[in-house]
Amino acid sequence: MKRIVLLCNGGLSTGILVKKMKAAAEAQDFACEISAAPVSDAEAVGAEADLILLGPQVRFQMETVKKQVSCPVTSIDPVSYGTMNGEKVLNQVKKELGDLIMHLVFYARLAEEQGEFDMAGVLTAICDKLRYRHPHIYGDIQVKDEQDVLRNWEQLKLKEKGRKHKVLEGVPVSLPALVKAYRIQDKVRGVGFDWKQKEDVWDKVREELGEFEEELRKGDKEKMEEELGDFMFAVINAARLYGLNPENALEKTNRKFIKRFSYVEDKANAAGKKLADMNLEEMEAYWQEAKRTEE
């Protein structure tokens, strides 16, 4: 069964499209798993995906996502996305998967003609790999929860032939800094380098904030930037420990700020005022009014 993942900013529209695609797949008797995830989780969900579809609003991240995953990545047709046409998007999926399968068969055939390997060998290899990395299913390893499964997965990957035995070697250098920080922390967690109690992370956050404030008082810009990075890294770590996606959280705040500031602009225009001519107290009054409209 093919796994298709739609990536977006975590909005409602992609969830609606997933439902419509599932309905279309059921009507066509097309066996597949379809899900949605924020683009910041691309590397994590890409490990199990056969195809990734980017929403039009995040297609500018195409090259970044391609570096994070090994499966094909393409963007959803904007018209099909805008009209929430699940059937058309599903047809796009079929075409992309067909192209993928054609390449797999083609390369396997070339290799077979050269006496290297054949399709049966390819399928056997992936089955062996899945059995090896899932000893809790195919072996006698006992696990308590998802954390044990992930820890085993990371440790087994490090043992595989040909790897450099570096936990963080799989983190793409090209990732945006915020996403990279989250991925680094998630990787080391897989080998047990993590807080025993998630509440303990707040001591670290406060420690890093104090060090940042100290450097602000000294005025050394390079040190200030370094400590700001440490503080942000600690906050991202706290978000991870509490199951929160910092990329999504920041994007929600961006949208909230834009909405509130647009309200301030609209109120100023309605009053015949220009923002540049208003004082901070006047704008703050409109800002607080905007907040109250959200309650």
Image: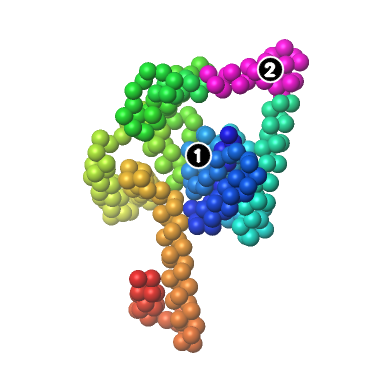
Residue 14 visible here: no
Q: Residue at x 58, y 50 (%)?
A: 23
Measured as percent of width and height from the top left, residue 93 is found at 65, 43
Crowdedness of circle 2 by 10 Å Cα count: few (<14), some, many (20+)?
A: some
Instruction: Identify the residue at horizontal 55%, vertical 21% (top origin).
Output: 127
- Residue under pointer 1: 45
Which portion, as a residue range, is magenta? 107-128
Identity of the amino acid at label 1? Val
Helix or strand or loop: what does disc 2 sit on? Answer: loop
- Is residue 295 placed above or below 33 in the rendered structure? below
Circle 2: residue type: Asp
Is 24 left, or right, of 109 in this rendering? left
Residue 58 forms part of the magenta stretch: no
The kind of secondary structure element at disc 1 is helix
Q: Residue furthest bottom?
A: 272
- In this view, the residue farthest toward the top is 115
Residue lying at 39% horizontally and 36% vertically, measured from the top left:
186
Q: Is residue 212 visible?
A: yes
Residue 5 position (above or below residue 248): above
Give residue 118's mark: 2
> Measured from the top left, where is residue 157 in percent x and y?
46, 23
Exactly how many numbered labels are in the figure?
Answer: 2
Residue 123 colored in magenta in the image: yes
Q: Is residue 286 above or below residue 119?
A: below
Asked whether the residues under the numbered discs 2 and 1 touch, taking CB atoms below 8 Å apart as contact, a structural biologist would say no
Which is more N-terminal, label 1 or label 2?
1
Around disc 1, counting alpha carbons within 10 Å, would you say few (fewer than 14), some (14 to 19), or many (20 or more)?
A: many
Q: Nearer the viewer, residue 76 or 170?
A: 76
Question: In percent of the image, x 55 and y 50: which residue is there?
Answer: 18
Q: Main secondary structure of the magenta part?
A: helix
